[in-house]
Amino acid sequence: MTPTYSPSELLTINAARLLQDGDVVFVGVGLPNLACNLARRTHAPNLVMIYEAGVIGAQPARLPLSIGDPTLVSGALSVCSMYDIFAFYLQRGNVDVGFLGGAQIDRYGNINATVIGDYRQPKVRLPGSGGSQEIAAWANRCYVLTPHQKRRFPEKVDFRTSAGFLGGRSERQAHKLRGVGPQAVVTDIGLLEPDENGELTLTALHPGRTAEEAIANTGWALKVSTSLRATEPPTAAELRILREELDPQGIYLKGSA
Amino acid sequence: MNKLTSLSEAIAQFVHDGDTVYAAGFTHLIPFAAGHEIIRQGKKNLTLARATPDLIYDQMVAAGCAKKVIFSYMGNPGVGSLRLVRAEIEAGRLEWEEYSHFGMISRLQAGATGLPFMPMNPTAADDLQRANPLIRTVRDPYSGDEVIVVPALKPDVAIVHVQRCDRQGNAHLWGIIGEQKEAAFAAERVILTAEEIVDEDVIRSDPNRTLIPGFIVDAVCHVPYAAHPSYTQGYYDRDNAFYLEWDKISSDAAQVKAYLDEWVYGVKDRAEYWQKLGHAVHERLKVAPRPSEIVNYGQY
């Protein structure tokens, strides 16, 4: 029997599967934090979690609400200043994976976490970059977790807080950034991955979801890969770790993603 | 020199209307007690700089202390929107200047090290550069490639909360040490608040832990629990419940006013504030000890 699961659990589990053993990951709070901890407890025991607050090799004993939670510090490998974490670790090229989020992500994986509408006369003012501008440029590869909704997937973002492939893969390449850019967008419908032009394309569907749903919930004419695959459903073991060990109160996992 | 003074005297003497203030601390050690004292003293037209304005600047903006904010992430960390700063910006009533986190702390790094600017590698996301003319590019004279530069930030006053310091202001900090050292060295004047005032011998027993030397410090204030609802590593926990509660309070102007009346204007200092929080909150924020191994510096 296939276990049932929430959209947040689906995102988290599929994100965890993208991580490799030994990856050094620049982690955010919420679902990326859960995904890293799940990967550490399953196929990637040597994964190293780095937080922008300056914590390296965190082993949080409880679920951190904020990016600067004291549980990240106790038992960590190292704690350094913010300047050091962004300069020695991220800019120097010591981060394999970055997780990004935002209000909008466009056809070429550019992300807006800054503003809806005009910058100087904002319709909705969002929190802004935080670490994401540099993570998107300098982490070797990036992943995005987001619910699949049309308003979150416009053809073009209102403001480029962080760079995906800009106007296409060759444009990003011309900038000679050290990171290769977004490698997958995990949604509650499936996975979008960049094609040879850097255009986000539907490459995988979660169990029971259809390409039509993905197309209907995307703001541009979403291409469907000719080798469209199906993701493996969440396993009982993955769900047990998430529910019993990592987020027993369902603070992040009960939500609709 | 003994710089020990009360927080109200330190704020009165070293924070002036129109100053650029950097209240340091990334999530950890945020000097809320000093923020509340600034509100009580009715300081005006401040430029409030912090990577994350956090609740401390949300409250100071609500109380009318600010004319401008400088920031790199304007949210309620782990909760969502920072409603009051956001509303003022959306309404066009508050000036703002924005960076990425790395841009913001590079500004402090330049200020702290006496440089005019700091270079950073490009990110190809140049909308923020278009929006903020202080973010510029220069040519690397060695490779000929372009690098991004941000100007030194030199606050008039930095406020830093620490675990412990001596009467001269030699300060030990541990846990998340975001940008306290950089803010202190970048600023013209430095106010310390401390959980504990200790003898100089304690500082000298572990010199690697001294991030801020006393000779750059102007005032030392003994203010236990000064960081609440932020936290002090090893002393008390972050009050996550209050960060969630603020999301509700800050969605309603009347509740904001009631909060400031009761918890800022309605108490005379941090000791009274902490007392007023009550036993249940004190218990909830207690933290069990987890000491490090002793470091042996050797007797030479």
Image (cartoon, coloured by chain):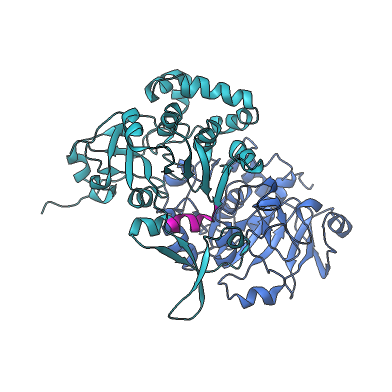
- Name the residue: 45% across, 53% down: A54
* Segment tinted magenta in the rendering: B98-107
Q: Is B205 located above or below residue B102 in the figure? A: above
Q: Is A242 located above or below residue A45 in the figure? A: above
Q: Main secondary structure of the magenta part?
A: helix
Residue furthest bottom as drawn: B143
Q: Is residue A225 visible?
A: yes
Whole-percent x, y for residue A134 in the image: 55, 62
Of residue A204 and residue B81, the one placed in the foreground of this image is: B81
B196 relative position to B28: left or right: left
Q: How many marks?
A: 0
Based on the picture, tell me whether residue B101 belongs to the magenta stretch: yes
For residue A243, which quarter of the picture?
top right
Whole-percent x, y for residue B44 in the image: 47, 35
Q: Which chain is blue?
A: A
Q: Which chain is cyan?
A: B
